[in-house]
Image (tube, rainbow, N blue to C red):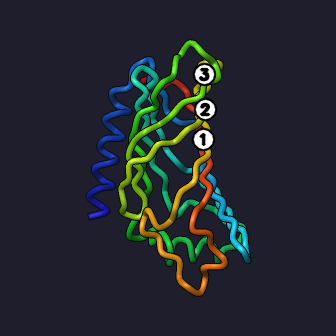
């Protein structure tokens, strides 16, 4: 089932990219960082392998995050993250498909809100993310920081580890886009 959803997402992603015109942008650099502060240990990971497309004409945005590409300070943390919590063999990608609302392309540095569906760990939820959108030198920069509750996505924390892992993690996204040219 997850493979079928991933295939459908890839088809949508390819269709979006293939229909790209002058006002569509494709990611050139991405970073998704999460931080969990807990009683015994802080956990932080970074992923720079995300792919994204943004259409500045209508505000549509889509991105795909390969779960097993998060890098941790300790290799054991990465192993536990992929095997015990995220089950990345079963759920290899997180995806977001939505719309950035209330922005004016004439401004350079703008507050913006993205609304859409975020799917992670096989659970799809409607979310709203407040961030920043910047048009500069024919590039687009999108940044946002938001909190994510693990239980909302059925990510379970074993009772032995509840003091090491927070129930809510801070997620930071930083995307840079360039105009897509055929």
* Residue that label 1 marks: 144
Q: Residue 101's x, y, as percent?
A: 45, 28
Q: Is residue 27 left or right of residue 134?
A: left
Quarter of the image with the N terminus in it: bottom left
Query: Of marks 2 and 1, which one's residue comes earlier in the chain?
Result: 2
Q: Would residue 111 be seen by someone viewing this image from the given angle?
A: yes
In the image, 155 versus 152, the foreground residue is: 152
Mark 1: secondary structure: strand
Circle 3 crowding by C-alpha within 10 Å: few under 14, some 14–19, many from 20: some
Q: Specify the label residue 132 is tagged with.
A: 2
Residue 52 image point, x, y percent: 48, 40
Q: How many marks?
A: 3
Residue 135 numbered mark, or none: 3
Query: Which residue is found at the position 39% from the left and 42% from the top?
Result: 116
Nearer the camera: disc 1 or disc 3: 1
- Callouts 2 and 1 close, C-beta under 8 Å: yes
The vertical placement of 93 against 83, above or below, is: above
Numbered badge on residue 31: none
- For image coordinates 55% across by 85% down, the residue present is 159
Taking the image as drawn, is residue 48 in sight?
no
Callout 2: SS: strand
Mark 1: give few (<14), some (14-19) or many (20+) Cα within 10 Å: some
Estimate the x, y position of residue 168 in percent, counting from the top left.
Answer: 58, 63
Name the residue at 56% across, 60% down. Answer: 69
Asked which quadrant contains residue 61, the reply is top left
Compute the Cα span from label 1 to label 3: 15 Å
Nearer to us of marks 2 and 3 is: 2
Which label's residue is closer to the chain start, 1 or 3?
A: 3
């Amino acid at each position: 089932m997850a493979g079928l959803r991933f295939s459908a997402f890839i088809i949508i992603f390819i269709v979006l990219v293939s229909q790209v015109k002058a006002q569509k942008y494709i990611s050139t650099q991405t970073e998704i960082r999460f931080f969990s502060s807990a009683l015994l240990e802080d956990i932080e990971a970074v992923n720079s392998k995300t792919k994204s497309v943004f259409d500045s004409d209508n505000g549509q945005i889509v991105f795909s995050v390969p779960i097993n590409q998060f890098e941790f300070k300790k290799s054991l943390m990465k192993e536990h993250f992929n095997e015990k919590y995220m089950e990345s063999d079963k759920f290899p990608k997180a995806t977001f498909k939505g719309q950035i609302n209330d922005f004016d392309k004439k401004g350079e540095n703008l507050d913006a809100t993205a609304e859409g569906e975020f799917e992670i760990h096989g659970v799809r939820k409607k979310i709203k993310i407040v961030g920043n959108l910047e048009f500069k030198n024919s590039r687009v920069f999108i940044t946002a920081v938001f909190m994510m509750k693990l239980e909302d996505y059925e990510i379970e924390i074993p009772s032995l580890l509840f003091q090491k892992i927070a129930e809510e993690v801070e997620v930071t996204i930083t995307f840079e886009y360039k105009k897509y040219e055929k």
